[in-house]
Image (cartoon, rainbow, N blue to C red):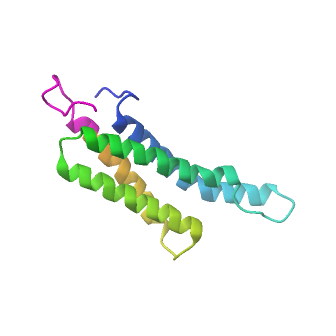
Amino acid sequence: MKITLNHPDSIGALNSSLCVIHCFATPFLFLTQAQTSLVEFSGVPLWWQLLNYVFIVISFFAVKRTVKNSSNSPVKSLLWASWALLSALILNEEFEVMHMPEIMTYFAGILLASLHIYNLKYCQCDDENCCPPNK
C-alpha cells in the first residue's frame, strides 16, 4: 500500500494517530510536571492544550477532502460521524460540560484513523475510472 502525504487519507490517519498519542501522553505530562516542579502544580501548558484544536482543524480538512474523493458512502458517513464525535469529546473535555470516560476519546481517535486507513486501502486505483477525480 503506497502512502503519500498528498492523499487526504494519509494526512487524516497520521493526524488521528498523533491525536491518540497526544491523548495518551497527557496524563504522563501531568505526572512529570507535578514531580519535577517545586512550585504548586499549575496545569497543562497552553501550547499542549492548543494541540487539541490543531488536531480538530487538520482532521476536519482531511475528512472533507477524503469524503469528496471516496466512492464508499458508508465510510463517508462514518468519517463525518467519528470526526464529530472526536471533536465533541475534545471540546467537552476542554470546557468540562460533563464527565465522559477518557476511553471514549481514544476510541473516537482510533476509529477515525482506522477509517482513513481503510479508505486509503479501499480506494487504490489503477486508472482514473475507479475513484472520483480530485476536485
Residue at position x 38%, y 59% in the image: 84
Residue at position x 18%, y 27% in the image: 125
Is residue 79 rendered to the left or right of residue 86? left
**Above or below, 50 relative to 70:** below
Residue 107 visible (yes or no): no
Magenta-colored span: 120-135
Asked whether 46 falls inside the magenta stretch, the response is no
| 113 or 33: nearer the viewer | 113
Position of residue 106 measured from the top left corner of the image (x, y, whole percent): 45, 58
Position of residue 107 measured from the top left corner of the image (x, y, whole percent): 40, 59
Q: Image quarter for residue 124?
A: top left
Position of residue 94 measured from the top left corner of the image (x, y, whole percent): 58, 65
| Residue closest to the far left | 129
Is residue 133 rendered to the left or right of residue 101? left
**Above or below, 101 relative to 26:** below
Quadrant including the N terminus: top left
Residue at position x 48%, y 51% in the image: 56
Position of residue 33 measured from the top left corner of the image (x, y, whole percent): 74, 56
| 115 or 66: nearer the viewer | 66
Is residue 59 rendered to the left or right of residue 70? right
Residue 46 visible (yes or no): yes
Quadrant including the C terminus: top left
Asked whether 123 falls inside the magenta stretch, the response is yes
